[in-house]
Image: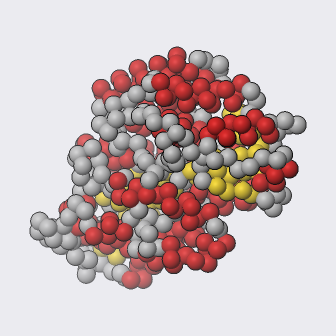
Amino acid sequence: MRYRIAAVAAAAALSLSACAGGGTPASTTTAPAAASGQELAVPTKPVTITFEEAMTIGTLKPAMEKLVSDFQAKYPNITVKLQGDPDYATMYTKEKAEVQAGNAPTLGQAYESWASYFQSGGALTPISELAGSDTPAEMSTFYKGVQKDLALGDGKTWMWPFNKSVLILFSNADMLRADGQNPPKTWDDYASVMKAVSKNGVTGSTIDPGSATAAAFGTQWFEILDKSDGGTLYDADGTPHLNDAGAVKALTYLKSLKDEGALATGKNYPGETALGAKKGAFDISSAAGYGFEKATVGGKFNLGIAALPSGPSGPVNELTGTNIVVFKNATADQKAAAWAFLKFITSPAEQAGWASTSGYLPVTAQALPLMQDFVAKNPYETAAVSELDTAFALPPYSWIFKCQGFEATALQDVLDNGAAPATALNTAQTACTAAKAQG
């Protein structure tokens, strides 16, 4: 999901949106809950479910609407009302308010840390209650990295995948070729090429470090650099190590690029803007942003697309995007309908259509063979999808969202204000440790 959604007015929400709430089934009777080990059956009576989502701009809107249209064509007794939000921050604020008011939607997009927050308050339905199993058969078709991203700290599956992607490296292929540079294979190569092309008004790349309230691709690049060099920013239980030697080394790497004029900072997809204006050679961004990058470049040069460079630990990438959760206050009929919807939208055919239209990656390996025409025109897709098996996600705890904000603040302090990496990361570590203690 692109942060630029924040710039879109709330009026851009989908026309299918309804006021907040879990939805009211046409019949006041509800199906009995599934017995232990038994999957909820698709309801046969009319039922309405609501979905709090932020797929409301660009190609995301028609892609989301088609998922709903296809589902309702198969299950005409189930009405899905989209509650469209202009950005993730608005969506999270609304979801929290609705849960606190006892008026949560049936379904909602959620980052792992958000799901942890809701689950800790008893607001979520576990997948086992819907599927009769904590690891339903459908999960086995998902890429391994996606599968690992569905559980919370208790090891139980509380989420279902939705809009997933990884980071890739976009470049001005013509500029690199003219300067005699090869596509970088390692992060050391990347630094060398960045410095070599940073001349005559060109800066190697421009990144958004993020902010205290919203991590950005610059934050994720820092996390990837640390992990690709063998570092561990967070233990599995969420314990932070933001000031470890590996983290300091990663931030020092970024600072050296900035100090030598090979890296700049900005906001609102600055790397994409600089690349399209021929003022930048590279942009690290989500594979889901390919359409935006291509439109910004506008055919002015050949757009290079490659996997991220590797570090000493080999190739490393990070999952981006959200999952979907089912809220606890839904009726039995709504939960059964929600489970039918979750299974449907992650089926191979629907994932193939969703990925080809939205730009996000398919979560199931069975979708790619159905996307041959799309892949032929967008060859980056195969390489990006292959990284879904190994891409990591940060530990699913409520404080991690805050800690990423502290990471972003450290990047800002170093890259924009000249702070020492160790000093800035000590501050981030202290703040994150306190956030973990508060839970």
Q: Residue at coordinates 81% horizontally, 61% vertically from top-left? A: 299
Viewer-nearest residue: 46 or 428: 428
Furthest toward the left, the residue is 35
Regarding residue 379, the answer to whether it shows in the image is: yes
Regarding residue 19, the answer to whether it shows in the image is: no
Residue 107: x %, y % from top left: 35, 60
Position of 151 relative to 130 (above/below): above
Task: Indicate the quadrant containing the C terminus: top left, top right, bottom left or bottom right.
Answer: top left
Viewer-nearest residue: 352 or 372: 372
Position of 244 relative to 98 (above/below): above
Q: Residue at coordinates 48% horizontally, 29% vertically from top-left? A: 246
Residue 132 located left or right of residue 412: left
Examine the image and state in which quarter residue 302 appears: bottom right
Position of 54 relative to 97 (above/below): below
Furthest toward the right, the residue is 200
Residue 234: x %, y % from top left: 38, 34
Residue 313 located left or right of residue 268: left
Residue 37: x %, y % from top left: 14, 67
